[in-house]
Structure formats: structure tokens, C-alpha cells
Image (spheres, grey):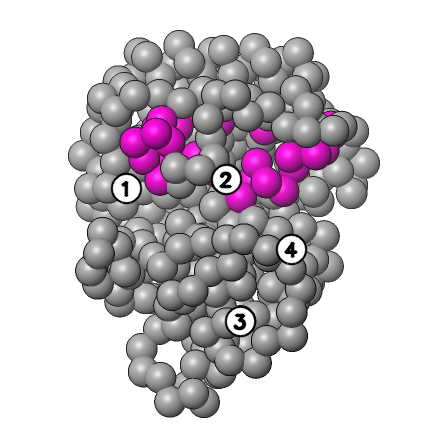
Amino acid sequence: MKIFHHPDQALHAPTHEFHNGALAPHAEVPGRIANILAALGPTQQPGDAGIDPIHAVHSPAYCAMLRDVPRLWREAGRAGEAIPYAFPVVGRRPLSLTRVDALLGAHAMDSVTPVTPDTWAATYGSAQAALAATRAVLAGERAAFALCRPPGHHAGPDYCGGYCYLNHAAIAAQSARDAGVARVAILDIDYHHGNGTQDIFWRRGDVFYASLHADPATDFPFYWGHADEHGEGDGFGTTRNLPLPRGTDGAAFRAAQDRALKAIADFDPGLLIVSFGADTWEGDPISAFRIATGDYRGIASDIAAFGWPTAIIMEGGYAVDALGTNVAAFLSGF
């Protein structure tokens, strides 16, 4: 299997997040990617496909914010990473904003996703890895893996959140559509619901989004991922959410995934994107499923059995020391 990774992904290194009422050490650390690389061996550096595939998903104004906020933060005399504190939850509309706090809050959904001077380079490199993996699959590879970091599935068309800045899975899916694939499916098997991916394709009938995740009644992102969310307009019926209770083990997860895979089969995609998060592992520090390392091969094998060309995009997973072993176990199922 071809594996793509960009060295700039290690540059993004926020120190803190504002979580549960206090500043806490940031859980999404560069060591995540180092541990995975040590377990997987050689990777390929992706070429640069440019900004256009990113702008096909994310607004230019939002991308400019990710690039400009670190400079504006310093010019405002601020130290550390840029963390928003005010959010336009009602009456959100285009405004010409100059204060950095207003600009940042207009494009964010939480206070756990700081923007650092290296955020843009890292997430841009991840987007290029996702695009390279997708191109490899469209060129005939059975499956390819994009080792993306920071993750992406919480990022919406013009907002960041949940440690995510660019939605690499959505960028990959849109690039496949632009390359002529009539129908693309995304299977999201991270512990948390991929609200950004759902939001991007909510009204689209050409991209099917299926997600298995912790019940948002108890877990982040809370406001998306409920079972009664099905899409709107042309996209009605192309969103399928399967929220699961805390404590879900490998067998229960595979049973739920089987329902998602059958729904995807009915959609008959020409390409599958898998948003894979290893934060479903039983020892993850911010999650509460009971999936063992030995379960991951079977979970992946169930997906591979359907025979779809598959681009696998790395999402979450915060038990750093076990991350590489869990990712390797999953990829072995392909």
C-alpha cells in the first residue's frame, strides 16, 4: 500500500487548549505522527497540487484567516497561540472584521483548536497527502493511506474546530468528483462525529456520508451526529449517522459498521474515503470505546471485502505510544 505523508505536518505544535473550564496541555501533539511513522516504515512525500482543490471545499476567506491570524495575533501584542473566545452562534453573516479575536471567532467552533504560526503549513501538507492518496487510488491502486496530521473531519467549509483546520477527507472526496467519479462515499470511523464533513456535503446527493461515533448526547461535538440527521435537499438520504454508547466493543462496532457499509453499497460509489480515527481504542485518553488493537484488522477487512477503491485518511487517536501499532493493525486489513 502506498503511504503519503508531508514533513510539515510535524510543525504544528500547540501547547494548550481551553477545555473543561481550564487551560490544559494540548492532546494533538507532533509525537502522534512520529509514532505512526516509526510503525509504518517508508512513506512518500506528496507533490503540491496547489490551493485550488482546497478552495473547492473551503472558502478563500477562511484559508486566508488560517494564514493571517498568527501574524495578526503577534501584531496585537499577544503571546502564545491564537485561541478564540467569542463565537457568532446567531446571525452569522459576512462582515469586514479587523480585530483578530473577531476574525478568529467568526471562523471557529471551539476553544480547543489554537492557530499557530505553523498550522497552515501542517494542514496544507496534510491536504496534499490526502490528494496524493486519492490520485493513487484513481490511478489503479487498490488502497492508499494519507497520514494526515492535524486531523480534519471537524473542519467545516469556513470554520475550524476539534483540532481540525482543513477537512482532508472532504478535499479528497471533492477532488475525486472533479476527476469524474460520479459518486463518492465517506465512511467516518473516528470516535467523534465528523461534523465538518457532514456539513460540507449536507445538501449534496453525489457524496454519501456515513459515520459511526460516540453518541453526541454524551460526547463532542454534541450538536451534530444524531441519528435523525439525514441531509437536506438533493442530499436528503445521503447522510447516515450511527451513534454508539460509551463502552462499545469491537464486536458491536463491527455490527454497526456492517449497517453503514450496506447503506454505502446501496449508494454504489466509485470510490470510498475512510476517515480513520484510532481514538476508538480502549486506552485512548479522551475517548470511551473498548476496541482492542486486535479488532482493527477485522474492522478494516470488513471494509476491504466490498472491493471499493479506497483512500484512507488519518483522523484522531491520542494514546501516542500505542498509535502506530493501532494504525498498522488497521492497515493490515487491506
Which amino acid, mark 3? Leu
Q: Are marks 4 and 1 in contact (CB under 8 Å)?
A: no
What element does badge 3 sit on? helix
The residue lying furthest to the right in this view is: 180
Q: Looking at the image, is mark 2 or mark 3 nearer the viewer? A: 3
Q: Looking at the image, is mark 4 or mark 1 nearer the viewer? A: 4
Which residue, given by chain and number where applicable, does mark 3 sit on?
Answer: 103
Which amino acid, mark 1? Leu
Q: In this picture, which residue range is highlighted in magenta?
A: 192-220
What element does badge 1 sit on? helix
Q: Looking at the image, is mark 2 or mark 4 nearer the viewer? A: 2
Q: Which mark is residue 58?
A: 4
Mark 1 to mark 2 CA distance (whole Å): 23 Å
| Magenta stretch encompasses residue 159 | no
Please give left or right for residue 203 compared with residue 157 in the image: right
Which amino acid, mark 4? His
Mark 1 to mark 3 CA distance (whole Å): 35 Å
Sequence-wise first label, 2 or 4 = 4
How many other residues sit within 10 Å of disc 4, few (<14), some (14-19) or many (≥20)? many
Q: Are marks 2 and 3 in contact (CB under 8 Å)?
A: no
Mark 4 to mark 3 CA distance (whole Å): 16 Å
Which residue, given by chain and number where applicable, does mark 1 sit on?
Answer: 323
Task: Say above or below: 91 vs 171.
Answer: below
Residue found at x 35% / y 21% = 244
Q: How many marks can you see?
A: 4
Residue found at x 57% / y 36% = 198
Sequence-wise first label, 4 or 1 = 4
Sequence-wise first label, 1 or 2 = 2
Q: Which mark is residue 195?
A: 2
